[in-house]
Amino acid sequence: MSELENWQKKCDVCGEWTDGNKYVCSHCGEIMEEERLKKKAKREKQTVFDVAWVTIRPTDHLIIKAVKRVILAVQVVYFGLLSFFIWMIAMISS
Ligand SMILES: [Zn+2]
């Protein structure tokens, strides 16, 4: 890799070479792919976390709270069993 390639990045939107240190393309103003991917990964991580654990808010309706508690209990049991199986597999294989 040459020094020029290190310094410059090709914009995936307009195809022009732009300053590698810049957050946005100096030609079309689009956010550089790397930064977009980073943002996307961050977003997906947060979404997965939100889906993984149900949050019970004090403002929730009593029925919603009850349903959420059941989902949360199922999740806890599921993750508990999952970690138990992982532990068991580790015990058997060792
Ligand atoms: Zn561009």
Image: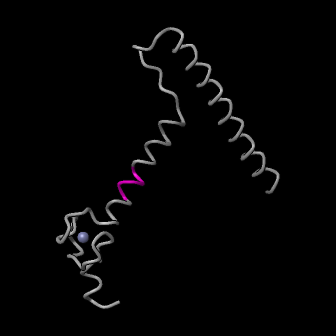
Up-down relation of residue 78 to residue 67 (above or below): below
- Depth check: 91 or 69 in front? 69
**Quadrant the C terminus occupies:** bottom right
Looking at the picture, how far across and down is residue 62, in whole percent?
A: 50, 8
- Part of the protein shown in magenta: 38-42
Does the magenta-highlighted stretch encompass residue 4? Answer: no
Q: Is residue 58 left or right of residue 76?
A: left
Name the residue rendered at 24%, 81% in the picture. 7
Up-down relation of residue 41 to residue 25 (above or below): above
Up-down relation of residue 7 to residue 12 (above or below): below
- Depth check: 87 or 73 in front? 73
Name the residue rendered at 62%, 19% in the picture. 70
Task: Please state the quadrant of the image where ligand 1 appears.
Answer: bottom left
Q: Residue furthest bottom?
A: 2
**Quadrant the N terminus occupies:** bottom left
Name the residue rendered at 34%, 66% in the picture. 34
By secondary structure, the bulk of the magenta-drawn segment is best described as helix
